[in-house]
Every structure is written in structure tokens, then in C-alpha cells.
Amino acid sequence: MLPEKKMLMRRMGLIIALILVLFILGGCTIKKELSPDAEDSAGSTQERAKSQDRTAFLVKDQGTVLVYFATPDGKNLVPVTLSINPTKEAAKVAVEKLLAGPENDFSSGTIPEETKLLDIYLQGRTGYVDLTEEITKIPKEKAEQAVNALVLTLTEFAQVDDVQILVAGQIVPKLGPVDISKPIKRPNLINAYGEPGEDGVKVFFSDANAMYVVPVTVKGDKKNLPLSALKRLIAGPPEESGLFPTIWPGTSVKNLQVEDGVATVDFNAKVLGYGGGTTAESMLVNSVVLTLTQFENIEAVQFLVEGKKMEYFPEGTDVSSPIPAPQKINFVP
């Protein structure tokens, strides 16, 4: 029996030794996972994810971008649709176009021209925009407009909910008086005058050159927001905005009905008081359609004059059927 006991004890010793070796190797594995090499690997994974997110701004080629410049007097932001070469990096191109400024004299830049784009990427639903330090040279009174232009331009992409602005790769507390230390959501109000509050509605007026329609946020009547917006459009822009009316004086709304996504608007005869001119007619139609189709339940507008449907307006605009919102606002080929 004694030799058998010795053999059994020897086997148990070998088993215990094997367990100790496995435990030591396991400890080394844990340490290895916490080693700098492993951290580098994790960093590489993050970089790969970040790289993959760069294409998440857009899932297909896009031939236009919507950029927010300013009116020539600098008072208002104006959305301008620009034609670009089809690309999957439309977000990058949009920001570069914004930084470069407009190519004509009918709008003005919102960001110092020497500002360059260092990087742009998407993490989650936050767009990160890394700019050179020249952005900090912007006058304090223009900082809010510049931030809004960036945020509005990038949140035109459906994948972006908010925007984090970086300066030379770093998060900075403020740009002038504007807090940019955290992601900024798309502003609810654009070119707001007075105190629009929660019932603010967008109304589209003409710029001084009659080139672009410009959104202005004004206070609406929550009892009937579409009708109140239309009445504000007819009343004309706030004097301090520097904008111009798009509808002839004396025009009134005889009736407004919304059914199955179509707003049928019956104007009095004064609506055709402009008498002709393609620019005046285009401004009239676009401003009415854009003002009304901002509401979720309105997809198109049917024009009536004195209760009757017309085939064409004086300059040939076909108003025989409902007109949907233009896909490209203020399009510059």
C-alpha cells in the first residue's frame, strides 16, 4: 500500500503544479492585455472606427450641397444650394465651400477666409469639425452667425444631430461669446426678429438683389400656424432685416384649406399686381410654397385667385396643379 500512496501523492503534486503554471500564464495574459501594446491596438481599433464613420455622412454620391452664407449686408443667413462633383465626401466639400465663401457678390462669407479645414468625421450622430486657429480671429459680434452657419450646413445631412467644433484638434471653451465646449444642436430659429418663442414660424422674403429667398423666423399664431405664417409673409419683412417683400401690396388671403397634404390658398386679385416679370413671379411662388411646406402636414400648394384655378400666372408659371417645395433652394449651378 505504501508505494501506491507515494504514487498517488506524486500524481497529486503534478496536478497542483500544472494548476499553478496555468494560473501564472493566465496572469501574464491579463497583464499583456493591459500592456501598452494592447492599448495601441485599442487605439488602432478606435481609429478604424473613426475612419469608417467618415463615410457615414453620406451613403451615396451627391451632386449638390446646401451651404449657409450671409446676405451681402451680413444681417441674415441665407441657404444656398451649390453644384459639386458627385462625391461620397459631400460633408467635407460642404464645409470647404462654406470656408471658401461665395463665388459671387450676391451673398457674403460667415467665417474668416484664411480658416482651413483640418479634419471632419462622424462619431455616433455628432459631426466633428476641426478648424485651424484662424477661426478664433472672427469678430465677437459675428461669432454666433459663424457657428450657426457651420451647424446648419452640417445638420443638413440626415446622419448629423449636432456638431462639435474643434480648433487645432482641441475642444475650446468659447468662440467669442459663444459656448463651443460641447456639441451644438441645429438652431430652431434662423434670422429671428423680435421674440418668436415656441410658436416661431419661418417666412421667406427676398434679398436686396432679388436673387435669393431668405428665411426669417417670426412669431406665429398657434391656433393656425400656416395661416398666420402666410399673413406674416403678406405683411412684409421686419424693417431691420434689410429684406424685401415678395407679395404685392393689398394682397389678402380669402381662404386657406389643407387636405391630404395640399394647402389650397385663395388669394384676392391683388396677388397678381406685379403685372409681370419672371423674377417677381418666381419670388412670389417660391416664398409662398416654402413658407407653407415647412409644416409637416403640407407637401404642396395649390394657388387660387378669387376662388378660381388658373392655368398659368402672367409670366408662365404653371399653377394648374399643386406645386411642391423646390428640392434645391437658391440653386447656384
Image (cartoon, rainbow, N blue to C red):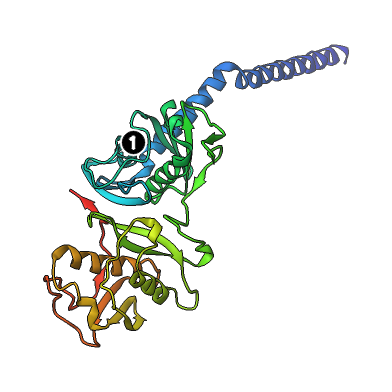
Q: How many marks?
A: 1
Q: Residue at x 54, y 35 (%)?
A: 174
Observer-nearest residue: 234 or 42? 234
Judge left or right: residue 328 versus residue 161. left
Observer-nearest residue: 5 or 288? 288
Which quadrant of the structure image shows residue 306? Answer: bottom left
Q: Residue furthest bottom?
A: 307
The spot of residue 271 in percent (x, y) is 24, 77
On screen, 269 above or below 229? Answer: below
Observer-nearest residue: 63 or 312? 312
Q: Amino acid at mark 1?
A: Leu
Observer-nearest residue: 201 or 276? 276
Q: Residue at x 29, y 72 (%)?
A: 300
On screen, 9 above or below 147? Answer: above
Judge left or right: residue 31 versus residue 217. right
Q: Residue furthest right?
A: 2
The spot of residue 5 in percent (x, y) is 85, 16
Which quadrant of the structure image shows residue 24? Answer: top right
Callout 1: SS: helix
Q: Alpha-carbon neighbours of circle 1 within 10 Å: few (<14), some, or many (≥20)?
A: many
Task: Please say whether residue 132 is visible from this viewpoint.
Answer: no
Query: Which residue is tagged 1?
Result: 99
The spot of residue 106 in percent (x, y) is 24, 47
Task: Please say whether residue 280 is visible from this viewpoint.
Answer: yes
On screen, 173 above or below 186? Answer: above
The spot of residue 78 in percent (x, y) is 33, 51
Judge left or right: residue 70 versus residue 190. left
Q: Residue at x 87, y 16 (%)?
A: 1
Q: Residue at x 27, y 81 (%)?
A: 267
